Image (cartoon, rainbow, N blue to C red):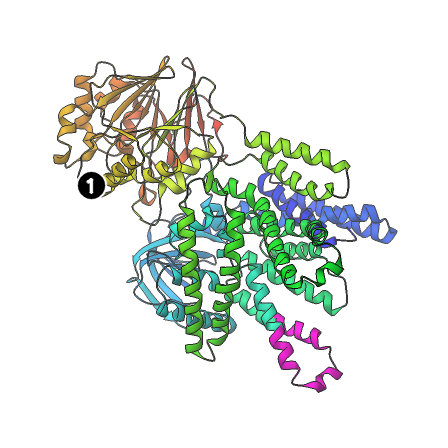
Amino acid sequence: MLRRPSAVLAIAYGAGIFIERYYPVSSRVLLGAGACALVLALGCICLRRAAAGTAAVVLLAAVLGALAYAPFHDLPAHVRQLAGVLHSPVFVEAEVKRTEPLASGALRLTLACDCIETPNEQLPCSGLVQATLQKPSRTYHYGQRLRLGCRLRRPRNFNNPGGFDYERFLAHRGIYLTTFLNNDRSIIVLRENGGHPFLRALERYRSGLRSLICDRLASPERDLVLALLLGEKQTLDPQIKDRFARLGVAHLLAISGLHIGIVSGLAFALACFVLRRFPRLFLYVVLWKAAAVLALVPVAVYCCIAGLQIPTLRSGIMIAVCIACLLINRRQDALNALGLACCIILVWMPASLFEISFQLSFGAVLFLILYAAPVQKLIAAIEGPASAQRTRRPALWLYRFLGGTLAASVIASAATAPLTAYYFQQLSLAGILSNIILIPSIGFGAVPCALAAAVLLPLSEPAAAALVHAAALILEQSLLWIGYWSDAPMICAQVAPPSAAAIAACYAALTLLPLCLRKRSMVAACLLCTAAAVVCLHAPPKHSDGQLRVTFLDVGHGDAAVIEFPQGRAMLIDSGGLRSDRFDAGESIVVPALRAMGIRDLAWLVISHPHHDHMGGMRAVMEAFQPEELWVPAEQYPEANFAAIIATARKQGLAVRAPVFGTPALSIDGATIEFLSPDVRQAAAARAYHDLNDISLVIKISYGAHAFLFTGDIGARQEHALLERSRDLRARVLKVPHHGKRGSSSQAFLDAIKPESAVFSCRPYAGRDLPADVLSRYRQRAVQELRTDVHGAIQITSDGAQLAKYTFLPQRRFTALPLPQPVCRLPGSP
């Protein structure tokens, strides 16, 4: 610890945060442990017990980390007191803290709320509110004081395996309330110039840069320059983001060490040039030390302009630490500087430990530091003796640049691969080559041009505009290369998220590998960890154990059900979908859930009927997997999205089938699939149907003594038709028709099915519960209610004789339901 105290304290502080996040400890226990550690540390210092004192300080750091994260477990008081006014019309007075343009032209505002007015009272409020304006008609900026009429609500997750924890993501930023407005007609600007003067000046400068870029460039170059210069990636086309990720160069879109290094280097050179004009200063200061201190000012300003993102902060702090070491004539230690940056960021933002950007940024830099010495020795050994180097100096410089870039690309790719596989379920197979080509063009071409434009804007707008155009030209050529190679086959591998054991084994192997060059005994340990990682990553599919598994995913107001057959093959019935074009339910919800569940063979896709909340994510699922067949209720229907899905399926070589009542039953791994609806007449007349719900594909899957009935969105009329033409509708598990809305789940229908459990795939709007009359019909028959809005994803397994039921909530992992399961009621429901 004496050699690298910052690194050790950073590890201890981060460990405390991690433990508190997953294994919460009472605040009283933490305070007691912290007091004991502090007393022990002071005693050991007085008694000069170095080892015991070090252990006490490490324990104290861990306790402080746990205490820093503890408040995130509970809702703040201002949110709890607003429970009674959520989803009701209110007026909010707040100050704009942050504005984020979105790709669709929408605008996201982060507001610091002061008070909330209801028709009956005025409530004080001190937290942050995230407001999304779909069609803003005016410009908003930092410091404005607004009064807006809206309905506040708590953010909600889609609670599935592999799902993004949006609630916790916002909570880590202090946001517990959100609102959505179609327009800003209900917003009144009360005051223009609030907030801190320095932050207002920064925001004006950012606005000037944004206007310069937006007025002179077109998309996608405009959006890329905004991302590279200001860190605004919200307007980037998702397809471009995906192409960068497929090639393994998504890090180029983040403002990190490259940008800060360029800024600090240019600032240092400029400071030296200016200081040389004043020779008398050399009597009092050392030139390069004074220039280094002055270079910190533009670095700090640029970190603020770029939005104080975690990679930016890490780079800025490390540069500041290195300059401080130079000023006091101390030897620089990169690991110590990294540890200090980690400590500062975690003390300021404890929850940042769980941010993807934090983990990728610190992980990549950590392993670049660990491998720096071995790589330098390797390059020096290949170069040969110094006498031979003098005769080939230009070639040597080129060799060192290419060798260093190649080594850095390999190390960074290996260091981030486990996390990339875990969070994004993909690994780029071209990352090394892509980095060698694109880092020089974007990192040393487009980025310096954009940064120079930012510097010249206050002095000469035409010069800044010329540099912006130069950056756009470089990016245009880079995009051509990226677009061509990102579509190449086998350029990116889709993988299941690795387990915690696999990730730990990978990083253990990466950590031990450089030690192997110095200590022979480490070779065996490194090989062992590598073997463990390979075994964990290539584990056999989870679900080939002879059981039928049916998982109803939480896709909001929509349907998506995964059927895993006893031998491991899988079927997807519907894929959810939201009304917003900015959110792809397949890409963001269904595909991550399928990969997290270990599904590799998705053979069948089913669209129950052509409504967006059932088929909105199907194209993304087709692209992510290689299915064999697509089942639809009717192949010909005049709906653009449905026609596009059919066209995509045929292009990929899928067999498109339209099974109807009377189609022979299928047998898959001992499970029988029957088609109960629509009938031939309805399928043929699908074009004329105004209510597409009644042509829903109704499927019954039987395995042993158990049956599952999938009903799509059929209503009472189609339920009656099913009763007339089907002899046996009995099923232990019923997917409730039409999300539990009125006009379905008739009494005769439920009497014929006799379900034991009913799965409601739903998310009622504005805090209202499902219709009371529908719920009462199920409760009168003592049917177990399972709801995706309450339980999250629901998994039911059958071995042919016994049913087992699991829910994703409240543990955010599948846990068995206690039996008997009580009837579920939402707060305020009848």
The residue nearer to you, when weighing 479 against 696, is 479
Q: Is residue 77 left or right of residue 401?
A: left
Tally the numbered discs: 1
Q: What residue sits 40% from the left and 51% below the top?
A: 483
Q: What amino acid is at disc 1?
A: Glu
Residue 617: x and y, percent?
A: 33, 39
Residue 406: x and y, percent?
A: 59, 51
The residue nearer to you, when weighing 380 against 75, is 380
Q: What residue sits 59% from the left and 44% below the top?
A: 414
Which region is colored magenta? 269-296
- The answer to whether residue 287 is magenta is yes
Q: Which residue is mark 1?
A: 639
Q: Residues within 10 Å of mark 1 (few under 14, many from 20)?
A: few
Q: Quadrant for residue 671, please give it.
A: top left
Q: Is residue 650 left or right of residue 440?
A: left
Up-down: is 355 above or below 801?
below
Q: Is residue 266 left or right of residue 123?
A: right
Q: Quadrant of the C terminus?
A: top left
Residue 682: x and y, percent?
A: 15, 28
The kind of secondary structure element at disc 1 is loop
Q: What residue sits 63% from the left and 74% below the top?
A: 294
- The answer to whether residue 808 is magenta is no
* Residue 544 visible within the image: yes
Q: What residue sits 73% from the left and 69% below the top?
A: 327
Up-down: is 120 above or below 487?
below
The residue nearer to you, when weighing 631 against 763, is 631
